[in-house]
Amino acid sequence: MPCRRWWLLTVVLGLVLPARLTAAEGGGSPDAERSIEELTEQARKSIVVVSFSGRDGRNQGLGTGFVIDGEGLIATNLHVIGEGRPISVQTSDGRRLEVQSVEAFDRHVDLALIRVAARDLPPLPLGDSTAIRQGQSVIALGNPQGLKYSVVAGVLSGTQEIDRRSMLQLAIPIEPGNSGGPVLDRQGRVLGVVTMKSAVTDNLGFAMPVNELKRLRDSPNPTVMSRWLTIGALDPQEWTALMGGRWKQRAGRVLAEGMGNGFGGRTICLSTAPAPEAPFDLSVSVKLDNEEGAAGLAFCADGGDRHYGFYPTGGRLRLTCFLGPDVNSWPVLAEVKSEHYRPGEWNELRVHFETGRLECFVNGQRVIESTDIRLTSGRVGLAKFRSTVAEFRNFRVGAADGQTPAQAEDLVRELEQQLASQRRHSQAGRLATRGLPERPQWPLDSMRDRARELERQARDLRLAATALHERRTLQELEQIFAQGDDQADLFRACLLVARLDNEEVDVDAYLRELDRMSRDITEDLPADATPAQKLQALNKYLFAECGFHGTRGDHYYHRSNSYVNEVLDDREGLPITLSIIYIELARKLGVSVVGVGLPAHFVVRHQPPEGPSQLIDVYERAVELTHDEADALVRANVGRPIQASDLESMTRRGMVLRVLRNLRGLAEQQRDNDAHARYLDAIVRLDPDNPEERVRRAIVMFSLERRDEALGDVNWLLEKKPDGINLNQVEDLRQAILRGDR
């Protein structure tokens, strides 16, 4: 998943101070104000140092936490505990405590609760962040710059909306290490959790209001440490990491960071697939955070020190034959500078290997050719050097697609010509140039005209690429259901819905992740496990071990919760998306579970071979529902008794449509017409005879001035004359389209 906007605007680590409460949690009169010295002495016993280490055992980060109940529950920031990393907790008296579980976490508010093996820690009382007063005196405790158990005083300067979250703002010195610490009023009650430091000034920070922490406490999603440490871990059935470094995967990408223990910080990660036979093509897209390092493809690897490497380094492309553990045994076969390499961006690297000859490409352009024959076969994978952080995506082994760079260029030119008659107007931006020689004959007006033309071409090509991506994705989605609902791949279809909005969704990678989860569940199951035992193992894995849970609070209405790939990554989602994952895993286990579309709250039904079926609310951690409880849910959501139709099994097509309609509703509320049009296109592809959706799409397409598409839906409605549609209004819309109204 991309960085959140507020991570880009602020330094990750900081602080915010809230204001004073008028009453402690649960009511009652406010306590008398205490001096800073008294507050510090009392609160210090509840403050802990929280650190996380990499998988190589080295310390990677340090922050603050504080005790919130006497059963060993400690609050901190999610970024402090480092997702999927070993966690260490040290108390003010020097004790190191074992972390038993991550009791709850919420990536959207950057909060986490961890439980430690101690029951003698004094908790801090939690206040009420809705009762603060601007300008009130507060203090914050933490471990800035490693200076443990420090305190700083200030006042609440206000509240701010950041990434649709109300946060407490305080003018106060904040340093790395304060993150996760409490902000206290002068009665010693927690008003917020230090979250981030302003990038604008040293004396401004932000804290997450304590009521968000209480929400998390009241809706736990515990993840035992053995499972927490698997978050982001490479699938050992796909990858083998060698020579140290830290390799992990998320969102279909592989991330490499940290120095390897090979010479020059070398670390490699090899595919577990059998070594490909020559000739073969190998490709990956890579992005480096630091061009001084290097990262790219490894091939013909023996699992030790011998392999070829093709990678960018220092802004150049290099092909090296690694024959041993040190630089003296690393002959550089070629090193070139290429205008086609884009530093700091995603670049596609490709190698074509055949006996006695290999070619290396960057972004479709051949840059290196070699006839070196010292290595003739071996495994393939990825390599990284020095301290560079590298991201990899779209790792592929196999035959080339047969399209040469020249052919691709010809197709782009053809597309440019087709777009030339449909130019969209755009205001030209300004480009600062340096070192341009002064010549009186420079045709300035012509240069500016050409620049505007190029900008229009670039915009048109981007729009065309987006449109083609959407069209291809919709065609794939439609094809999934071409052979009938029973044959449809539900999870793939939902991944394609996510890919409509994000071209980078790696569908195959997430399908493999679902397979890996299924293997994890079956590891401890007996060969003759019953459906009930399998379902019990599924529930334990998802909810007791991995912490999957329903999204709560304002973020419930975020689009991320409708993308099944992000639900897998973040382990939280809507009733429908959590249920789809549950249904698909149950299917892989051989258990019959179907979707049930209760109004406004999706559930599932287990249908065993023998005995009665059972409704299950996956959103509530797979709690079983009686008929009366399901009736109560329906009454609460739509104000009527449950009906027989509410309990019918939903088709796979119907579940995908429900996800799309959730997204459509959000786009409509946010007045995002481009997204609205995408979702309506998908809905009409899957439900072409639905007149209400045709009306919606016609109106949205008309508003986007996509008149031909709007006219197509209008003509369909006038021809079919469906019941319940005001055809006079449809005819009025048709006339407006034909007149060219806006």
Image (spheres, rainbow, N blue to C red):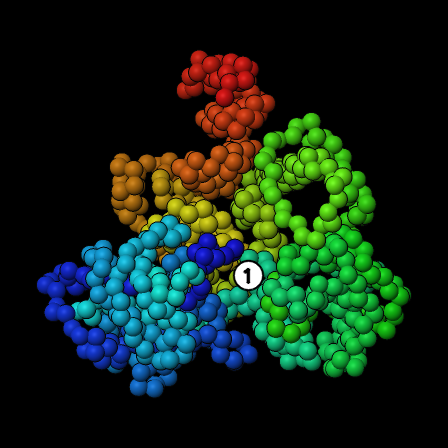
Query: What x and y, as percent, mark residue 472?
Result: 64, 39
Q: Residue furthest left?
A: 29
- On screen, residue 479 versus residue 326, left or right, reads left
* Drawn side of residue 584 relative to residue 549, left or right: right
* Residue 690 shows up from this direction: no
Q: Which residue is mark 1?
A: 250
In the rendering, at what x and y percent does residue 689 appear?
52, 26
The image shows residue 88, relative to residue 742, as above or below, that is below
21 shown above or below 626: below
Q: Residue at x 29, y 37 (%)?
A: 638
Q: Which quarter of the figure has residue 510? A: bottom right
* Residue reaching furthest to the front: 440
Q: Which residue is located at x 66 percent, y 50 percent?
A: 433
Badge 1 crowding class, 10 Å Cα cut-off, few under 14, some 14 to 19, many 20 or more, is many
Residue sitting nearer the eye, 649 or 508: 508
Look at 54% across and 44% down and name the residue there. Answer: 501
Task: Check disc 1 and give the amino acid type.
Answer: Arg
Q: Is residue 618 left or right of residue 396?
A: left
The mark tally for this picture is: 1
- SS of the residue under disc 1: strand
